[in-house]
Amino acid sequence: MMCLNSHRHNIRTLSPHIKKLLPVIMSSISLKENGGEVSVTKNYSNGGGLRDLYGEDSATEDHLITPWTFSVASGYSLLRDPRYNKGLAFSEGERDAHYLRGLLPPVVFNQELQEKRLMHNLRQYEVPLHRYMALMDLQERNERLFYRLLMDNVEELLPVVYTPTVGEACQKYGSIFRRPQGLYISLKEKGKILEVLKNWPEKSIQVIVVTDGERILGLGDLGCQGMGIPVGKLSLYTALGGVRPSSCLPITIDVGTNNEKLLNDEFYIGLRQRRATGKEYAELLDEFMRAVKQNYGEKVLIQFEDFANHNAFDLLEKYSSSHLVFNDDIQGTASVVLAGLLASLKLVGGTLADHTFLFLGAGEAGTGIAELIALEISKQTKAPVEETRKKIWLVDSKGLIVSSRLESLQHFKKPWAHEHEPVKGLLDAVKAIKPTVLIGSSGVGKTFTKEVVETMASLNEKPLILALSNPTSQSECTAEEAYTWSKGKAIFASGSPFDPVEYEGKLFVPGQANNAYIFPGFGLGLIISGAIRVRDEMLLAASEALAAQVSEENYDKGLIYPPFSNIRKISAHIAAKVAAKTYDLGLASHLPRPKDLVKYAESCMYSPGYRSYR
Ligand SMILES: NC(=O)C1=CN([C@@H]2O[C@H](COP(=O)(O)OP(=O)(O)OC[C@H]3O[C@@H](n4cnc5c(N)ncnc54)[C@H](OP(=O)(O)O)[C@@H]3O)[C@@H](O)[C@H]2O)C=CC1
Ligand SMILES: CC(=O)C(=O)O
Ligand SMILES: [Mg+2]
């Protein structure tokens, strides 16, 4: 026996075919397993060269063989493995031990210098989409460096990997597509979804973010190109919530698209057909949900993202008693807005029950938020939720939701059909309802007009105005409009970020009311407690935890959310409160309950510093 070479290979990446062949291969190679990794020593026989182990040489034309390549992870492939690649940061010793000599220029950079260089380069791009593409390339090249950058420069890079730029990226996903970054499950995979899941190289998945691409931000149906959203959300799970990247799985379910522009786009990457609906849709989703549970177990968190509301509410209801599911647009948004409202009481005074709320938009975000506000007021005042809903009003595309419309309303709007005469437009609704809080969740930009904002300011000393719709192009108004039209009276936050505004010599800093504050910490709380189901009480706990993180210094600037620069600490506190509630409700499976949940959450977080390789 002659030992020619010894290399490392990740056993998790071996295809099922090769795993089946392993016993055969084992007769000629020796494998040493170490924490999922396997060292492979290839043994060659004496006398006559390689054996025809797989029958390839002796096979006839009609004899089937498995076409496989045994790619050995040499130094070169280490440089191309984003999880382990460190680029110029490989030490001298590592370059020797891992066959990297000559594959890298002589210099050794540390991660800090690499970060400085990359940030310098990123800032040269004037077009946000080019920054997005550069960051995606980095994620594909050197995962730890990508997360280091995102964590250390979160306020600068969040608008790139997330809203607003991710919206443009999804619109142009077919043109900018380089490497697949998640799993695509289309109607073609019907009956085979479990097999498709097994093709994903990672086995211990803890969070899945899944979309069917039908309501991507406020940009509508982007079909298969919605993949940018699960990819972006999961990168925040890691950067903001500390969930290990290898535990995260982005999925797009492709049932077609009704977007004519995409159907006629030669670069469109999805199925070129109109959306499947009804039984065909329900069956595919059901097969998916079953396969996920079968493959990853009971405790994998499935986050539904950017489904259209005619499916989103039903999916959440259908699977919330059998799976660990969370709808970010309904529940995450509700939790982040409630947190902002709780915090704003310090600035506007009174209790939540003293306020009157008016929404423009009565879909997932609008009715989700409305319900959580009603639940919180009910919790605080002990009044039944049917009563507390009465101070919350919603306007949809047909006008104010009132009892005379009850029959024709979608089921999620019915609880909001209060007694009132019909009102058509938002301005008239503001005049009729006299809200203290105005929330935009319509997905339609420029709908908070000058008259609307002026009326809010004439009715309130400090009107609270939240323009939640994403991306920036769909925002109900800009920060500048909110401050100038209200003559500096408004407390303002928006779904996508706006720069600070100077008005009459004073600097106004707008907050970002985005579910990105909630879902990473919320998900981490579920994971560390081993939660098996999501309950509304956990969302309320997350809201209260986030509101508690707003400091006096933040309030002094008129902010109702803490800055994102502190997000890891904020996420640890949210995770701890969510986990505590999960234990209290008897829904935690991770026992015994850790004593200090904040410390425990922090200790579980992924850190992107490089590891040293032996
Ligand atoms: N900041 C954040 O964290 C989040 C922001 N969002 C944003 O919220 C927006 C809406 O999302 P979502 O609730 O899921 O969407 P939905 O499609 O579920 O709901 C949209 C609602 O807006 C109404 N609407 C549409 N056009 C108008 C109009 N011109 N005037 C009045 N009402 C109108 C619709 O009315 P009808 O029912 O009559 O059609 C519907 O009730 C998106 O832009 C999304 O990006 C969503 C989640 C989180
Ligand atoms: C933020 C978000 O989830 C949305 O706009 O859909
Ligand atoms: Mg969303």
Image: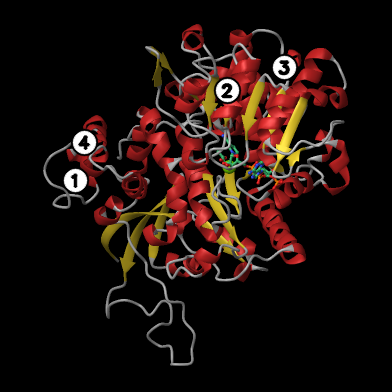
| Residue 61 image-quadrant placement | bottom left
Badge 1 crowding class, 10 Å Cα cut-off, few under 14, some 14 to 19, many 20 or more, is few
Quick check: can you spot residue 139?
Answer: yes
Residue 169 coordinates in the image, percent (x, y): 42, 51
35 displayed left or right of 295: left
Residue placed most toward the observer, 502 or 145:
502
Q: CA distance from mark 2 to mark 4?
A: 47 Å
Q: Are marks 2 and 4 in contact (CB under 8 Å)?
A: no
Give the residue at mark 2: 454
| Amino acid, disc 3 | His
Q: Earlier in the sequence, mark 1 or mark 4?
A: 1
Amino acid type of the residue that numbered disc 2 sits on in the rendered structure: Glu
The quadrant in which residue 377 appears is top right
Q: Which mark lies nearer to you, 1 or 2?
A: 2
Q: Earlier in the sequence, mark 1 or mark 3?
A: 1
Q: What amino acid does circle 1 point to?
A: Asp
The residue lying at 56 percent from left, 56 percent from top is 252
